[in-house]
Structures are given as C-alpha cells and as structure tokens.
Image: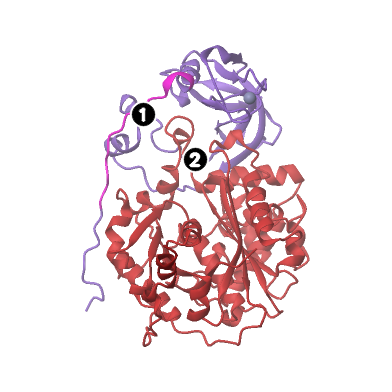
Amino acid sequence: MESNQYRVLEGNISVPYRWTPGDIYGRFLGGLKEKKILGFRCPECKKVYAPATDICTACYYGFKPEDQVELPDAGVVKSFTVVRANLWPPKPDPEVVSKAIAPTKLVDHPLLWPPDPPYALVAVRIEGADTDFIHMVKGEKNLGKLKVGSKVKAVWGEQREGYLLDLDHFEVV
Amino acid sequence: MERKVAIVGWAQSPIVERDERIHKTEMISRTVAAALSKSGLSIGDIDTVISASCDTMDGASISNVFVVESMGAFMKEESKVEEDGAYAALYAYLRLLTGHHKTALIVAHGRVDTPPQFYSWMMTDPFLLRPLGVEMVSAFALQARSYLSRYNLDERPAAKVVVKNRANGVKNPNTQVRIPISEAEVLKSPVLASPIKLADASPRSEGACALILANRDLARKITPDPVWIEGVGYNHDLYYLGHRDLARPESLARAAQMAYAQAGIKNPRKETDFAEVYEPFSFAELMLYEGLGLAEPGEGRKLVEKGIANLDGAYPVNASGGALCGNPIFVAGLIRMVEAARQLTGQAGEYQIKKDIRRGLVHATSGFCLQSNIVYVLGRDEAKPKPVKVKKQFKAKAKVKVKTKARPTRRKKARRK
Ligand SMILES: [Zn+2]
C-alpha cells in the first residue's frame, strides 16, 4: 500500500499587475529607449546615481527632473558572476509567464524568463557615476575576458520601448 | 545589560529537502507541541504568538491566517513577520519588554512549495533587477566576487568553511546534509554562478522551528537553565545591489555593535565563546566573521585557516553545521538561536562544544546579499548547567503546569490604583 494516498496539488498562480515607474525611474528607463544612460546628481552631496533612485541615500534628498545628467554608455566592471548552471525550471508556457510576471504591455518581449546560461551579471560603474548599474554581459567571447576592472560598453537592442533590456547587454572592450 | 527575557523552550522539525507526507499545518503543530512539552508549558500559558513565513512560498496572501490553529495562536494576540524567524523573536522580545505579555511563542515555517528561485526572483523590483533574472544564488555570487576582489582572495578559504560546517553537520541529527566533504571536492564541484559552486551553496530545505520566551520571573520558574537575551542589534541596508558596498555590509557591523553595546561587550572574540551564524553561502560566513568583529576586514579566512572556528577550536562557529547543512528559508536564522541555546544548556549532544561556554553570538540575515542583519548575544547563568539528556523530538511527555494565569503584575497594577 502506498504510504501517502493523498493527492499533492499542483498549480500556477497567474495574477495581472500594472507597475508604474513614475517620473524619476521613468526618465531613466525612457533614456534607455534613446540609447542614453541618465544619472541623477544630488545637489547637496554631488553624488551621481545611475541607475535612478527616487532619493539620495546619503542626504535623503528627493530627486527632481532637473537633477538629471547624461552619462556615457560605458563603464568599468566592479563585480561580476558568470551564471553557468541553469538555476531555473524549464520555461513554462509563454502566456502563463507573461501573465504572471511581466508588465502586460511587454508580453512579447523576448526576455520574460531569465536568459539561458551562460551569461554574466555585472555591476558596472558607469563613467561619471558613483554607484553601480547591475546588468548583463553575454556571449562566451565576452565572458572569457570578463574581470573586475574590465571596461565595458553598452550594446543596444534593436527594438526599444523604455524598458531595462532596451540596453541588451554590455560587451567587454 | 539587565537580563529581562530568556529562552525557556524550543523545538525544530528535522530539516529535510521535502516531506510530501505531511501538511504544513502538521509540521507546525508538532513542532509547537514539542516546544511546549520541552518547557513544561501548555498552550494556555502562552500570551502572544509571532510567526515568520513567506507569502510567495506559501502561495497565499497573509499566509499566516491559515496556520493560526496549528500555531495555537487562536484566542490570543498573533502577528507575523515576513522575515526570518530570528526577527519574529525580536518582535516577541520587544513585546515582552513592554510588560503586556509574560510569555511568547515564536513559530517559523518554511516549505518550498515553489522553487526557491521564484521566491527570491519575486523579491526583486519589476524595473531594474527582475528583467535580469537576479535571484539568491547570482546575487550572492556578485557579492562573493566583490569580497574576493576587494581583499585579493581566492576561493580556498570559503571552501574551508564548507569543510568545517559539513564536518559538524555529520554530528547533528536534526540537519539535512550529513556527509563530510574535502576541500578538493568543494573546489571541484560544479559552478552555479561563479565563484559560487554547488558545494558553496546551502541546500534546498524545508522545516519548522518554535521558540518560547518568558520574562525574568517566569523564566526561573519554568527552567533551571534559562538562556538570557543579553543584547540584540538589527540594521537594514539599501535594497539596490549597485547602491551599496557589497564587499563590506555596513548593516551587519551596525547590528553587531548595537548588540554588543547592550551586552557591554567591547571585544566579541574575547567576551563571547562561540557563534551560530546564518551563512546561506560559504563566502558569506567569511564576511560574517569580519562584520561581527571576530576578525579584521579581509582576514575572516584566518578563522578557518587556523582552525579557530572548528568545533574544537578556540572560537567555534556553526558547531551545528550551519545553513550550509540545512537552510529552510525563514527558519534557518531561528534555528541558529535554538542551536546556541542547545550549546549554552549542554544539550547539543555529539556537537556540544567541549570548552566551558557562557556566552554566544547568534546572527541571522534576510534579503539579498546580507541586506538586513540581526545579532543576538545570548548567555546562561554563571553556574554550569548539568548535562541534560536530549528529549526525543515530537514525543510529548506529561505536562507540568506553570501557573502563569495568576498574573502577579496585573494584581500589582490594580493595587497601585
Ligand atoms: Zn546627497
């Protein structure tokens, strides 16, 4: 006799959400659409944040649109990890995934599921910024060259819609 | 610090990868029953219940509502933290300090009903981190690289942490991974997200843990060996990984200093005897040595290289095997408190620290990359506890009623009026 005669329920929760970036984050994401990395400079301590944040964490100053500064689309790797193992279960039905986790406007975006390994997560100090931008480095050629201190440059996506992955990845230069 | 609140009872379910035979509620109620039995209390003696669990993992909003019965929290005052159980213990501790309650039950439960990657992925914001697939392993890997690069270290010291904890875990009947491992095996294990390899990561685990706190007067009546909370510190760092210094978690140092100030500790290495820390990954334990002030920045490796942190070392860390041997999310930090209480009362069995110990440190963390940290200083009475035979889990014995219903303070208050 089976020791457990009960049924283990399997299910999926699909819940629609609408997430609004607001003005400051919206400007940063909108900048990516124009192939620009925008920073925000605190008028009190002069620290430049890229990516955006609504407040300067040193001064608790609330950023305003005029604090925006344009930065180069290049920087230096401060930390990285090459993801080698597939940490994720197989990608489920795209319809299910998009409903569960993606902004509904972006259901057709290719990256609604984490990328297939290998890829690297990187912390990039954008030139002129005082914080690090967490993003990706892709392609074995780039991964092999990746070091703390590597110079990297943005590779922009063809289709851009005001979303983080308008900047497709960084490549080692 | 004045000793006002003590740990007077505890229990944990054995940590396992997955037990399909029991309902979450049974896992909780059996653990609570065992903790009550151990302290000789009945559920009616408990004034307030604080739980720790995760809505995303449970797949339900405010998921503690379903387990009020199992926790014995009905017709009482109950609340939940969406953090590790060590934070639920803080909440309960602060409640006892108000004087409104005399006893508190803390219940942490973590079942991996959804793959842990989903749970940690859902901890990210939808704009900046979620599109990158950032989850626990890759986030901690970024931190590990920051740390190694800051201090010019290779991966061997972290491997030594794994070797130490796994050797200890073999002796712990409640933990999940009880197989020793060599340094070469750790270094050769497959890379998950560099520099984190499979053996550097804690396993996928589930379990429950219960802890009972009582105020000073009652604690002495409940047990001859109360474990006192002598200090507690807590601090929270920034959320976005690129906006903080990953190599040197500021919130950890601040939490430790706050706890030490309360306990009157200037040098934790000299004034405490051992530590139980929550290390989700091997690299984190090295950083914890430094943040807790047990080693200078970049020199955490010395504790493992010189065997100081070994079970028979001068300052044992994770004698229980730590989270690397069993990491039920939302529970593992509370288990560190239980493990420290076992050590201080001489109930750790095969992994009992042999040297005379009086005070221990407990650390737990929550969030990505040691974002939030909590540190306790726990101490026992001056007299060394008599060796106690460890009771078998889940075998409730006849209950010894403690007359908490007499409510002495309330009468006092009434008289004052
Ligand atoms: Zn500022």
Q: Main secondary structure of the magenta part?
A: loop
Figure chain in purple: A
Rendered location of residue A147, percent (x, y)? 68, 36
Q: Is mark 1 within 8 Å of ligand 1?
A: no
**Is B334 positioned to the left or the right of B359 in the image?**
left
Q: Which residue is mark 1?
A: A19
Amino acid at dot 2: Val
User: Ligand 1: which quarter?
Assistant: top right
For disc 2, the neighbor class at 10 Å (few under 14, some 14 to 19, many from 20) is many
Q: Which residue is mark 2?
A: B134
Rendered location of residue B302, percent (x, y)? 77, 60
Disc 2 chain ID: B
Image point (49%, 13%), residue name: A34
**Quarter of the image where the N terminus of chain B is located:** bottom right
Figure chain in red: B
Q: Which residues, given as a range, are shown in magenta?
A: A11-24
